[in-house]
Image (tube, grey):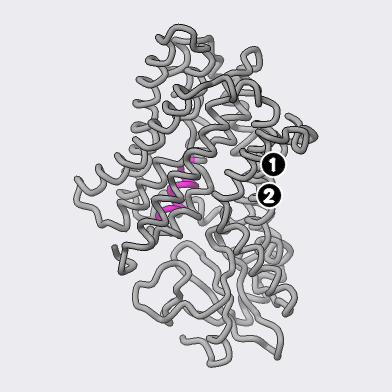
Amino acid sequence: MTASPSATHNPIRCLALNKAYYTPAPALGTKRTTAPANLLLGHGTPKLGNQGNRPNAGAFGTPSRRLACASSSSASAASSGGGDGNAPVVLSSLEQQAASFCAGFTRLFPLWVILAAVSAFHAPHLYLWFDNTCVTYGLMFVMAGMGLTLTFKEIISVFTKQPQLLLLGMVLQYTVLPIFGYFISRYLSSQPGLAPGLAVGVALVSCMPGGTASNIVAYIAKGDMPLSIMMTTASTLMAIATTPLLTSLLVGTLVPVDPRAMFISVLQLVLAPVLAGTAINQFFPAAVARVKLYTPFLATVVVFFIVGSMIAANVAVVASSGVTIVAAVFALHSTGFFLGYALSKALGLSDRIARTNSIEVGMQSSALAAVLAKVHFAADPVVVAPCVLSACTHATVGSLLAGYWAATVKTEDG
């Protein structure tokens, strides 16, 4: 079904798991859209403007075969609390402008991370009010926001759609960086005069699931958005087992690690908020539909303050870390980006999928690493330094790569 002429002038497009929806406006000055099924820190944010009608277009280019009008049955299902979590929303002109602003703000996520780090380093007093409790609940809020964009059916589909590609992505995610994190941490621990906690921090970062910002960078790089979303979701869900296990294996030889306590932390910080958000969206889609338009913006603001507060509370530690630790963190993420791409191409995958794997492997959840460092390695504040440096590093490198790919890739298929 194709959109009406009036719709194509200024549509709001929302990314779902490989589909977009648009419903013609019931009256002048309003748009009826479906809230996205997957709004994860930027992917799925509404975007104004005509994206063209290319075949095989990306997530924000909505070909006519992906356009659909919300039926009265879906509207009634949403209002009754059932349905698939894609409840129609009527947006006023002011709300459209607000949604557009939030979408643009979110797409600049890497810039905000770098700005937070630089400003916190030079003016730490601006962020000290955002203490450890705020950081913990802030991360839980981000994870709950991810859950609000999912349904239980979609979580199950993560493991059934493109299982081979998803399996490959998980293997790359939990082998490439952990392996290199192990060797880099061992090198750092052997350097005289270097705080042992820095090696622990690098190893901890390498064991994290994919960062939610990777979806924004994958979109900019013209990657495979549905695959990017599925990989981020799957690695996050798997983190309750893989992160404590890998951390115990990599860090346990450097300092004592309690994998059971870390498992409980990841359960509380990741899985519980995600499932809570999913349950709310599953049973109250109409109430959640409008909120989902703004959760990426709110999550971006929260991550901004998480990064800023972590830097502000550890200015001396970060400043004393020296060039060695900066180079180590840069080498870790650069290796992830490079091998994620190179191994995918070696296996004969398309350039578009290779770009996606590169970004997913190279970008880790540094915010989760920082919180776990605060909780489980509180006796050594140096551990958090590589975590906050990681957030700035992968955001910068990922953005540069995405910009290069966006400028050089001529077609959506790469």
249 left or right of 349 in image? right
What type is the residue that disc 2 sits on? Val
Gap between marks 1 and 2, in whole Å? 7 Å
Dot 2 falls on a residue whose secondary structure is helix
- 127 and 300: which one is in front? 127
Q: Residue at x 45, y 59 (%)?
A: 219
What type is the residue that disc 1 sits on? Phe
In the figure, residue 52 lies in which quadrant?
bottom left
Any part of residue 349 in sight:
yes
Q: What percent of the width, then of the height, locates residue 33?
A: 62, 76
Any part of residue 151 in sight:
no
Residue at mark 2: 301
Task: Give the residue at the far front of this rendering.
Answer: 122
Task: Give the residue at the far top of this rendering.
Answer: 192
Q: Residue at x 50, y 80 (%)?
A: 50
Q: What percent of the width, then of the height, locates residue 18?
A: 44, 65
Q: Quadrant of the C terminus?
A: bottom left
In the image, residue 230 lies in the stretch drawn in magenta: yes
Magenta extent:
226-235
Q: What percent of the width, then of the height, locates residue 408?
A: 32, 62
Q: What percent of the width, then of the height, locates residue 283?
A: 68, 58
Q: Which numbered marker is on residue 305?
A: 1
Q: Check the image and report above or below for 333 versus 2.
A: above
Q: Residue at x 57, y 80 (%)?
A: 11
